[in-house]
Image: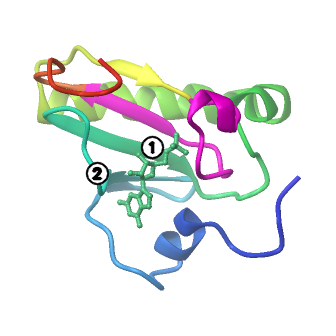
Amino acid sequence: MTSDAPSIFTRIIDREIPADIVFEDDRIIAIRDINPQAEVHLLVVPKRPDFRDVTELAAGDPALLADMVGVAKQLAERFADGQFRLVFNNGPEAGQTVFHVHAHVLAGDLSEGRLA
Ligand code: 5GP
């Protein structure tokens, strides 16, 4: 389920608003988080907008979820030492603010972040 208004990530995918894009293929985009909570804080986002959170994605397109994990690993190797924390916030009480599924990739120095 999605609301009618395009999410902030769809607007980035459609180049309506700018972002620092670090990866893109036909199904996934990855950007730097605008409010980083770690030395490396990236968001890995499927382009299809119809999954609100990772539970919906896992049920609806598990191969896409697996591909997101692969992209996260590749980015952690590129921007840090290959080790990373993968965070999915599920629901507003858990801190989710954008209801277009996305993975937070946190790497490098994690000591200062709210998610650390
Ligand atoms: P959530 O709280 O839904 O798990 O994560 C949403 C994330 O999107 C937040 O970490 C927030 O900083 C990031 N974010 C929100 N708006 C923008 C934006 O316009 N550009 C980028 N690059 N990140 C954004």
On screen, 3 above or below 73? below
Q: Residue sitting at 60 percent across and 40 percent down?
A: 96
Is disc 2 placed on a helix, strand or loop? loop
**89 on left or right of 115:** right
Residue topped by disc 2: 35
Judged left or right of residue 91, residue 106 is left
What stretch of residues is rendered in magenta?
A: 89-106
Magenta stretch secondary structure, dominant: loop
- How busy is the neighbourhood of tag 1: few (under 14 within 10 Å), some, or many (20 plus)? many
Residue lying at 76% horizontally and 46% vertically, measured from the top left: 51
The amino acid pointed to by label 2 is Asn
Residue at image mark 1:
44
> Does the magenta-highlighted stretch encompass residue 96?
yes
Q: Is mark 2 within 8 Å of ligand 1?
A: yes
User: In the image shown, does 94 or 85 lie closer to the viewer?
Assistant: 94
Indicate yes or no whether the magenta region holds residue 94: yes
Q: Residues within 10 Å of mark 2 (few under 14, many from 20)?
A: few
